[in-house]
Image (cartoon, rainbow, N blue to C red):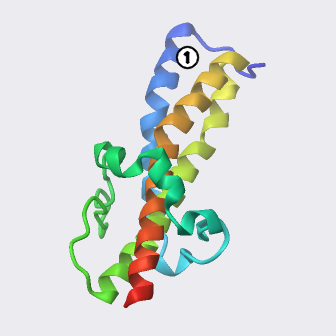
Amino acid sequence: MRLLELSPTLVLVLNFGLWPVIHFVAGYLAARRPRSFFQPGRGLYRLLKFENSERIYERLGVRVWKDWLPDFGDFFKPGFPKKKLKARSREYLEIFYVETCRAEFAHWLTMAGAPVFLLWNEWWVELIMVGYALAVNLPCIIVQRYNRARLARLLEKD
């Protein structure tokens, strides 16, 4: 049930134009959080037991498709690109590890914006919006968790 009656043109503009704004704002808010805000071993960022073996990620074929996803990790300054591992020092790996949490946070935050579309859309359009949010953000979250599991293994060896 929509709460606002808007013109069809405005609904189209909002439905297509608001998502980039939500992505941008979520990325900006995530970039502004200090690294200390993200604690990899706790809460949402804690790896689950089945993730440690990485078997789940192998079954999902993450290694095959992860490079197809865009990396906007350095879009906001200071930023941290996560497309490729650029060093193997413990300090770099620890920063990368925390930055996977920042990226995951940004994608969860983006998905949290989906309900706003209920204000002017019918329920079935909202389902499409939620489908979009899941299709665009879940693969990115999966890759961040995959990277975190691999980084955890590297950090344990060191």
Q: Is residue 43 above or below residue 158?
A: above
Q: Is residue 124 above or below residue 48?
A: above
| Residue closest to the far bottom | 158
Q: Quadrant of residue 128?
A: top right
How packed mark 1 is, by other alpha carbons closer than 10 Å (few <14, some 14-19, many 20 or more), is some
Asked whether 50 or 29 is in front, the reply is 50
The x, y position of residue 87, in whole percent, is: 22, 78
Asked whether 109 or 40 is in front, the reply is 40
Q: Is residue 149 visible?
A: yes
Asked whether 29 or 90 is in front, the reply is 90
Count up the numbered dots: 1
Q: Residue at x 46, y 60 (%)?
A: 146
Left or right, 144 with respect to 38, comes to left
Q: Is residue 32 visible?
A: no
Q: Residue at x 40, y 87 (%)?
A: 157
Q: Is residue 95 above or below residue 4?
A: below
Q: Quadrant of the C terminus?
A: bottom left
The x, y position of residue 111, in whole percent, is: 58, 43
Amino acid marked by disc 1: Val
Q: Quadrant of the N terminus?
A: top right
Which residue corresponds to mark 1? 11
Q: Quadrant of residue 37?
A: bottom right
The x, y position of residue 59, in whole percent, is: 49, 48
Q: Secondary structure at mark 1?
A: helix
Q: Residue at x 52, y 23 (%)?
A: 15
| Residue closest to the far top | 8
| Residue closest to the far left | 86
Left or right, 68 with respect to 113, comes to left
Q: Residue at x 33, y 88 (%)?
A: 90
The x, y position of residue 23, in whole percent, is: 45, 44
Asked whether 49 or 85 is in front, the reply is 49
